[in-house]
Image: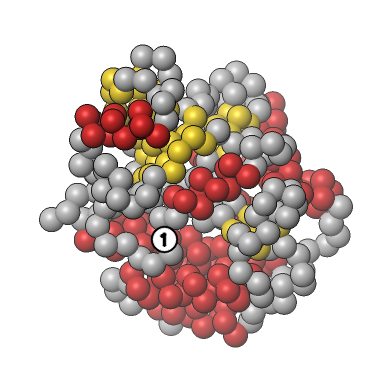
């Protein structure tokens, strides 16, 4: 059975990197990061510097998935904006020494918070961290794609219609069992499609707490990671995707805030967070919020189903996590049906 790890021939990788990155130096150690379900990510240590290598997984992959080249392009384009990103150095081809496409980027030392309840922080720190997330998300959506060379980074037309079609296709390609709530949700999204209203920006696609590197001691974001799902689209998709964590539970492999006293913790309520974002961007009241939330939940469920399918094929970056996701997919789908008021038989 194929494995999720690459065949890391260190001498071959060393020779390749020195040829394409003369400043790279001698490769002393490779360590795989434990997090991440999509693209395996490795820490590369040399005598003088530490780098990060992010790669497509080996094995047969779904079409348009694991787009490390898009990550490389997005971070390179944002290097001189108010959105903090790692410096990117090199993008390989598919015929690389590890057998798949990869890119090399800067390693940034800092804190990654995995639990959105931030149990390791004080109330004051929690408030500051959520405010910083809000600020950086608004800054991302204020970037002009044309100004940073990303004018062709997404397809024209209704973003939500396009994305709904894409993720329905991805979900059906990775479906391992029929889930009534997912079927109901897909039908509802297609039947209740919203107008795009002309809003378009660079969207991250997976903007959440554990894809951000914070300063070691300050509530300041040093880097936004994991740009695989980035594209040109509707900025409220990012906002709703992040706010989804307010509604998700913190079990069955999920990390959410449902059931917690967020006021007591110093974490803004969903409506407060959205209001702060709208104020930063000069936006008025948001229509169709339930659609945006339901779409975000469906998309997350479809992503997790892809991990399950890769685990069954032996290609998951973290196979153990797939067992929890088998329970999470129907749970998320049922929650989305509750948001839109659709009963599941």
> Does residue 134 appear in the picture of this structure?
no
In the foreground, 287 or 173: 173
Residue 193, percent from left and from top:
64, 79
Which quadrant holds the N terminus?
bottom left
> Does residue 80 appear in the picture of this structure?
yes
Specify the color scheme: secondary structure
Residue at 66% in and 28% down: 220
Residue at 30% in and 23% down: 27
Q: How many marks?
A: 1
State the SS at label 1.
loop
Residue at 60% in and 85% down: 191
Q: Is residue 194 left or right of residue 42?
A: right
**Farthest-out residue, left:** 1
Label 1 sits on residue = 65
Q: Is residue 159 above or below residue 228?
A: below
Give neighbour class at mark 1: few <14, some 14-19, many 20+ (Cα, 10 Å): some
Residue 87, percent from left and from top:
55, 33
In the foreground, 182 or 234: 234
Q: Is residue 31 left or right of residue 79?
A: left
Residue 262, percent from left and from top:
64, 41
Write down the quadrant of residue 133 in the picture. top right
Residue 258, percent from left and from top:
55, 50
**Farthest-out residue, top:** 47
Residue at 71% in and 39% down: 81
Which quadrant holds the C terminus?
bottom left
């Amino acid at each position: 059975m194929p494995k999720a790890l690459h065949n890391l021939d260190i001498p071959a990788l060393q020779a390749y990197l020195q040829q394409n990155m003369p400043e790279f130096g001698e490769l002393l150690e490779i360590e795989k990061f434990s997090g991440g379900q999509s693209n395996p990510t490795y820490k590369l240590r040399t005598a003088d510097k530490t780098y990060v290598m992010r790669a497509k997984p080996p094995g047969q992959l779904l079409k348009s998935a694991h787009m490390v080249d898009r990550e490389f392009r997005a971070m390179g384009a944002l290097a001189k904006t108010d959105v903090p990103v790692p410096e990117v150095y090199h993008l390989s081809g598919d015929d690389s020494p590890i057998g798949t496409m990869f890119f090399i980027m800067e390693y940034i030392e800092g804190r990654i918070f995995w639990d959105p309840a931030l149990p390791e922080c004080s109330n004051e720190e929690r408030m500051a961290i959520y405010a910083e997330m809000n600020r950086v998300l608004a800054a991302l959506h204020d970037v002009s794609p044309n100004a940073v060379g990303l004018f062709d980074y997404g397809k024209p037309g209704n973003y939500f219609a396009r994305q709904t079609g894409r993720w329905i296709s991805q979900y059906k390609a990775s479906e391992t069992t029929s889930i009534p709530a997912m079927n109901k949700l897909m039908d509802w999204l297609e039947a209740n499609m919203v107008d795009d209203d002309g809003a378009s920006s660079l969207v991250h696609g997976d903007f959440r707490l554990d894809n951000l590197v914070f300063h070691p001691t300050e509530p300041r974001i040093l880097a936004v990671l994991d740009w695989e799902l980035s594209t040109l689209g509707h900025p409220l998709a990012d906002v709703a995707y992040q706010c989804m964590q307010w509604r998700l539970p913190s079990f069955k492999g999920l990390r959410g805030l449902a059931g917690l006293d967020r006021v007591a913790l110093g974490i803004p309520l969903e409506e407060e967070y959205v209001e702060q974002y709208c104020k930063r961007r000069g936006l008025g009241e948001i229509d169709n919020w339930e659609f945006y939330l339901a779409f975000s939940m469906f998309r997350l469920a479809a992503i997790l189903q892809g991990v399950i399918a890769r685990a069954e094929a032996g290609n998951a970056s973290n196979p153990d996590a797939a067992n929890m996701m088998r329970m999470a997919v129907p749970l998320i789908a049922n929650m989305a049906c509750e948001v839109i008021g659709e009963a599941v038989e």
